[in-house]
Amino acid sequence: MATFIDEMIKKSNTNDFIITLDDWLCKKCGYGEHIDQLTEAEKVFFYNQTLEREVNSGGYHQFFSNPSGDYTYEILDSLRKIGANATAAIHEKAIAILVTKLGRDIPKGHMEREDMIFEKITEDDIYVIFDECDADFNAYEDNLNDLNYQFVIANKEQFN
């Protein structure tokens, strides 16, 4: 009997595969509210897609200001696990920028992080400080779709 992931793999378009799997995992974990319901491999995929969704939509400013920023450090690890080393370096640079501006590690809690960001950085400046990271991310030195796809295929038994 074919599993959901086996059916997904039959999709000919990698982008459609990524989008469908991302939607499925978001629903499975309540868009991160119940992250513990995902397997380790599912978390890797979820974290990577969370970063990509947020940065593509509103840059690193949006990523850090939204609940997605709760996974800042997990995303750094997940990028490395799929071999997205150039993207991991960009993410690490964005983290370093924010840590320097905040004068401390990035808080895990969304509201605490958002309050701290806007206490230490003006809203106009926050866009400027991440401009280079956003541009570097959007250059897509790593093919995240292919790397995520390859990771899923290599770990398909963990996607259930």
Image (cartoon, rainbow, N blue to C red):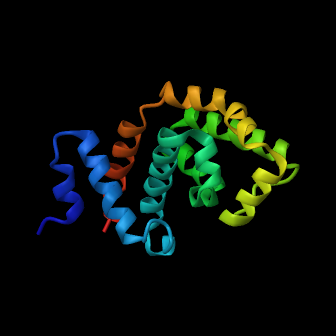
Q: Residue at 31% across / 47% down in the picture?
A: 18
Where residue 123 sits, quadrant-wise, is top right
Q: Is residue 23 above or below residue 58?
A: below
Q: Is residue 116 above or below residue 31?
A: above
Q: Residue 141 location in percent, x, y? A: 50, 25
**Farthest residue in the left direction?**
1
26 relative to 116 in the view: left or right: left
Q: Nearer the viewer, residue 130 or 38?
A: 130
Where residue 113 sits, quadrant-wise, is bottom right
Task: Specify the quadrant that holds the N terminus.
Answer: bottom left
Q: Is residue 105 above or below residue 98?
A: below
Q: Nearer the viewer, residue 107 or 81?
A: 107
Q: Residue at 75% across / 55% down in the picture?
A: 106
Where residue 27 sits, quadrant-wise, is bottom left
Q: Residue 96 location in percent, x, y? A: 76, 41
Q: Residue at 54% across / 45% down in the picture?
A: 79
Q: Residue 65 location in percent, x, y? A: 64, 53
Q: Residue 37 location in percent, x, y? A: 44, 75
Q: Nearer the viewer, residue 51 or 60?
A: 60
Q: How many marks?
A: 0
Task: Specify the quadrant that holds the C terminus.
Answer: bottom left
